[in-house]
Amino acid sequence: MKKLITTTAVALCLSTSAIAQEKTEFKVAWSIYVGWMPWGYLEESGIMDKWADKYGIDVEIVQINDYIESINQYTAGQFDGVSATNMDTLSIPSGGGVDTTALIVGDYSNGNDAVILKGDGDLASLKGKPVNLVELSVSHYLLARGLDSVGMSEADLDGVINTSDADMIAAFATDDVEAVVTWNPLVSTILEDPAATKLFDSSDIAGEIIDLMVVNTETLEANPDFGKAMVGAWYELMALMQAGDEEVLTAMAEASGTDLAGYKAQLASTEMFYDPAAAVAFTESAELPGTMVSVAEFLFDKGILGEGAPSADFVGVAYPDGSVTGDEGNVQFRFDTTYMQMAADGAL
């Protein structure tokens, strides 16, 4: 009898889940970063509403001030999608068992993430110093790559201090903080301090820190119009940005706490994929799997590639050609060019 009740409950749960996936209202989250400012503009300008109306759905875009918290909320099922990097997607939702698809490959950081020292010096100057960063985020990855480039490791530091991105600028201004690792627009603000010295940035590992809009795979599969509306809205705005629309760029600049010149400077250190065909080409490149293997190895080394992960291959990552790195039996992260290709083909 107990077995019958359990089986019925599971069947009911599965049935309810299937029904819940078919819906018309969606929520996605984003946080402040040069390459993600378009999400705020899409919500405020009505461009997202226009595309959502075209497909008979509603999409709400919500700003979350704390980046990691936005991913945690997505992972907990409070949002259908979130702006995130490739590394943080692999470690948090995918590593936690939430099957996630990279719907839009928006850009890669080409100088927007940086290791900054207070005072003069180089990477070797970090020896024996504490470093403030968002622990286990792309900042941590960037620091590890930088240290490795000069034959050092985290063991050579006086530890890392977990610091929210929301607190980073204030932290650098205090006397006891000697070095930070963070991303734009925070990098630009911190570098305005005459004492700040940039030691290493993401242009030194170009193509490895990738900025995405990721969505729940089951939700996307059950609601393809959600993907079409999101991608259609995104590339309408990308065309305006590529054309240099100053009204659009100024609005995003002000929302990120800078001016037009400041935002353009941040964009200059961002490899934005304004053209969907460029995003497709990058996502289908032979280099992407190698990057994801390196990221998985870093996460496993830090003990954050899923609870109890036995190896760096614990989570499977699928690519547009059908290939998989990691465990083919546990694919939880998917790079899918279907919708970006539709945008490139003018089929949305």
Image: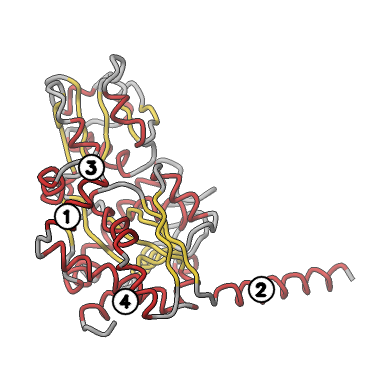
Q: Where, by quadrant of the figure, is residue 124 drawn?
A: top left
Mark drawn on residue 16? 2
At label 1, the amino acid type is: Leu
Q: Disc 2 vs disc 3: Cβ atoms closer than 8 Å?
A: no
Kindly report the distance in space between the C-alpha atoms of the residues bearing marks 3 and 4: 28 Å
Residue of label 1: 249
Q: Mark 2 and mark 3: span between their CA atoms?
A: 42 Å
Quick one: SS at disc 2?
helix
Question: Viewer-proximal residue, 113 or 191?
Answer: 191
Residue 316 visible, this angle? no
Query: Residue 95: percent from the left, percent from the top?
Result: 47, 54
> Which is more N-terminal, label 2 or label 1?
2
Label 1 and label 3: CA atoms lie apart by: 16 Å
The alpha-carbon separation of the residues under discs 1 and 2 comes to 43 Å
Q: Label 3, on which residue?
A: 184
Q: Which residue is mark 4?
A: 339
Q: CA distance from mark 1 to mark 4?
A: 25 Å
Q: Are marks 3 and 4 in contact (CB under 8 Å)?
A: no
Sequence order check, earlier mark of 3 and 4:
3
- Amino acid carrying mark 2 in the image: Thr
- Give me the residue at 28% from left, 54% from top: 36
Question: Would you say 28 lies left or right of 41 here?
Answer: right
| x, y percent for residue 84 | 35, 54
Report if residue 282 is visible in the image. yes
Dot 1 or dot 3, earlier in sequence: 3
The answer to whether the residue labelled 1 contacts the one labelled 4, judged by CB atoms less than 8 Å apart, is no
What amino acid type is highlighted by mark number 3? Asn
